[in-house]
Amino acid sequence: MAQMVIWMLAIAGSTAALVITAAANMHYIHMAIAAVMAIFMALLASRENKDAIATQANESAMASLNARYMGLVWTWGALVLFITYALILKWNEWLGFFIAFMVAAGLCLFFSALLSKDAEQGKADRSLLDIAWYLSVAQLVGMIITMLGLLIDGKMWRFLNPRFTDWAANNVFFFGALALAVISWLGIQASRRARGS
């Protein structure tokens, strides 16, 4: 419970800071805040994974943990996009990304709840766990491609041209992808450990 409170406070605080810096066109500070939040989310997820391993949590509990953290990262991204582009900056494509992020968040959290129920009952639904593993692998690859694409396309430096207003979204995309990549990797490692491979 304490960890969830920390997550909620971090999401609320960083969202407020990102919206304020976007409104003030504080590009580098905005980027720094997004980077710090991504690192924080990745470190917190890593710590929780270590704690779960230390208490010998079963595979369903580990998969639930990582799916929940993925859902929180997607929620953070959706929240930042919504407030920034519904109220502050103008960017025509934001709504599509917001909806996609909300769908991803909802699926991750729903999947986490299913796995958590199995963990509480001491069950291991092999089909659910296999899906969790494949989704973690797909998300890891997707997030690496996303980060490379943003760098190669020069989108992380679009704030240098005032006519581009998607610079704030690109910071969320890049650093959110970083956090998701780390959490996906943690999920893959947890699954391998549980299966003894």
Image (cartoon, rainbow, N blue to C red):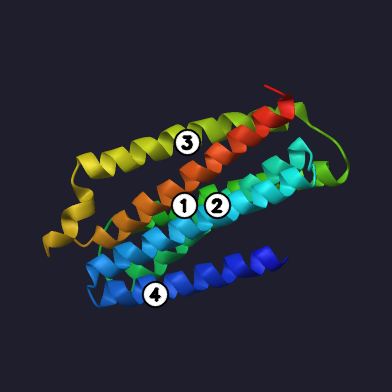
First in residue order: circle 4 vs circle 1: 4
In the rendered image, the residue lying farthest to the front is 54
In the rendered image, the residue lying farthest to the top is 197
First in residue order: circle 3 vs circle 2: 2
Task: Estimate how packed mark 4 is, as few (under 14), some (14 to 19) or many (20 or more) residues with alpha carbons within 10 Å.
Answer: some
What secondary structure is found at the residue carrying circle 2? helix
**Residue placed under numbered mark 2 in the picture:** 105
Residue 137 x, y percent position in the rendering: 52, 31
First in residue order: circle 4 vs circle 3: 4
Looking at the image, is mark 3 or mark 2 nearer the viewer? 3
Q: Label 3 to label 1, Cα distance in Å?
A: 16 Å
Residue 104 x, y percent position in the rendering: 52, 47
Can residue 42 be seen in the rendering of this structure? yes
**Residue placed under numbered mark 3 in the picture:** 140
Tag 1: amino acid: Phe
**Residue placed under numbered mark 4 in the picture:** 17
Tag 3: amino acid: Leu
Task: Estimate how packed mark 1 is, as few (under 14), some (14 to 19) or many (20 or more) residues with alpha carbons within 10 Å.
Answer: many
